[in-house]
Image: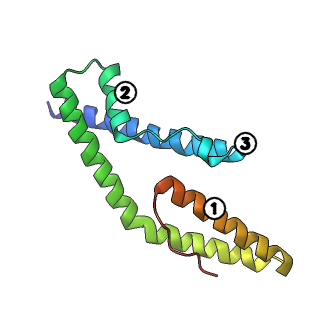
Amino acid sequence: MRSKTSAALMLIAIFLLGGISGAVSGYLYQNHIGQNPTQRPPVPTKRDVVEEIAQSLHMDAHQKENLKDIIKKSGDRYSALSVQFRPQYEQIRTETDQAIRAILRPDQRQHFEETLEKMDARRRALTHDAPPARGK
């Protein structure tokens, strides 16, 4: 019984990671071809994930409710992990920005700062979040 539960949780985790990977890949692809960010397809919601899994596996109502709970709990755990590691990501981003600034000529720095502002605006629009200001 425990191995079936572990296998089911592993399957859900793989599915969620695949969804996240797909969303990130799609974002990068859309950015690369220069499409307007407002024209990007929406990132699947937890409800979309539940519906897709439930339909593809022909789940009954009880299974679907259990699946909703599992996906919600998993999403909460991912969010907590994101909050926990965000300061480290921000530190890396700040250090990277500083290293790039160090190699730029004065005439390039203004354009770089404008580029950073655009990147931050896109990130805020995608995550509905306000990241801390980048260190200058």
Q: Residue furthest top?
A: 58
Q: Residues within 10 Å of mark 2 (few under 14, many from 20)?
A: few
The x, y position of residue 84, in whole percent, is 36, 66
Q: Nearer the viewer, residue 134 or 38?
A: 38
Element type where label 3 sits in the image: loop
**Residue 52 picture location, percent across and down:** 37, 27
Q: Which type of secondary structure does the marked residue at label 2 adopt?
A: helix
Residue behind mark 1:
119
Q: Amino acid at mark 1?
A: Met
Residue at (19, 20) in percent of width and height: 60
Q: Residue at x 52, y 60 (%)?
A: 124
**Which of the 4 image quadrants contains residue 63?**
top left
Amino acid on which disc 2 is placed = Glu
Direction from residue 49 to residue 59 in the image, left or right: left
The dot on residue 21 is none
Return the residue nearer the eye: 105 or 61.
Answer: 61
Q: Is residue 136 above or below residue 75?
A: below
Structural crowding at the residue carrying mark 3, measured as other residues with C-alpha within 10 Å and reported as few (<14), some (14–19) or many (≥20): few
Looking at marks 3 and 1 on the same chain, the residue that comes earlier in the sequence is marked by 3
Q: Residue at x 74, y 70 (%)?
A: 112
Which quarter of the rendered picture does the C terminus lie within? Answer: bottom right
Which mark, residue 52? Answer: 2
Residue kind at label 3, given as amino acid type: Ile
What is the distance, in whole Å, between disc 1 and disc 2 at their CAs? Answer: 31 Å
Depth check, front residue: 7 or 36: 36
Residue shown at 39%/60% (left/top)?
A: 82
- The residue that label 3 is drawn on is 33
Task: State which tag comes first along the sequence, 1 or 2.
Answer: 2
Please tell me whether residue 44 is drawn above or below residue 116 in the rendered image.
above
Under tag 1, what secondary structure? helix
In the rendered structure, the answer to whether residue 33 lies left or right of residue 96 reads: right
